[in-house]
Amino acid sequence: MKNKTLTAIKKEQAYGYVCVMTHSFFNNIIKVGSTTLDPKLYALALSEKTPGEYKIFFSLNCLNPNKVEESIHKQLHSKEYINDFYQVPAKRVACILQREVLKIPSVEID
């Protein structure tokens, strides 16, 4: 792993939310997303762009929400329905999210 500049490290360490959402049109299909907005506002903004309604099932404030979201997407890859939607119980993804946030990041220093 290459050394990162201090600026790059600080940029990665933004706080935000990772959200597990359900949609009114789909049964057992969830969406995982990250945002710096309030999760309810995020769901509302997504709902305005599509028919139906997104609802927050679970959200967690964490450091580096984009990296946490990316890790969850990788773990759920085999359950992918389409794009960022997965055919998996929301409760299971909430547990995965809680576990991901508890991981201690490692940094390589020369």
Image (tube, rainbow, N blue to C red):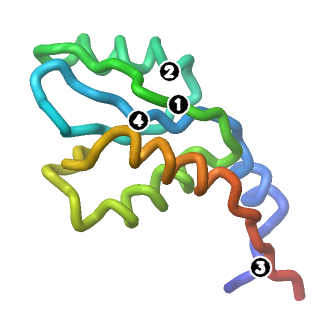
* Residue underneath mark 1: 59
Say which label, 2 or 3, has the lower sequence index: 3
- In the image, residue 94 lies at what x, y percent? 47, 42
**Mark on residue 20?**
4
Q: Helix or strand or loop: what does disc 3 sit on? A: loop
For marks 3 and 4 on the same chain, the one whose residue lies earlier in the sequence: 3
Amino acid at dot 2? Pro
Q: Which quadrant is home to the N terminus?
A: bottom right
Q: Tell me which residue sits at (40%, 40%) in the image.
A: 91
Name the residue that disc number 3 marks. Answer: 3
What is the C-alpha distance between the residues marked 4 and 1? 6 Å
Secondary structure category for the residue under label 4: strand
Horizontally, residue 53 falls left or right of residue 73, namely left
Q: Specify the label residue 39 is tagged with.
A: 2
Could you tell me which residue is drawn at 19 percent across and 38 percent down? 28
Q: Quadrant of residue 7?
A: bottom right
| Percent of width and height locating residue 29 | 20, 39
Q: Mark 3 touching mark 4, by CB under 8 A? A: no
Within the image, what quadrant is residue 103 found in? bottom right
Q: Which of the marked residues, 2 or 1, is nearer the chain's N terminus?
A: 2
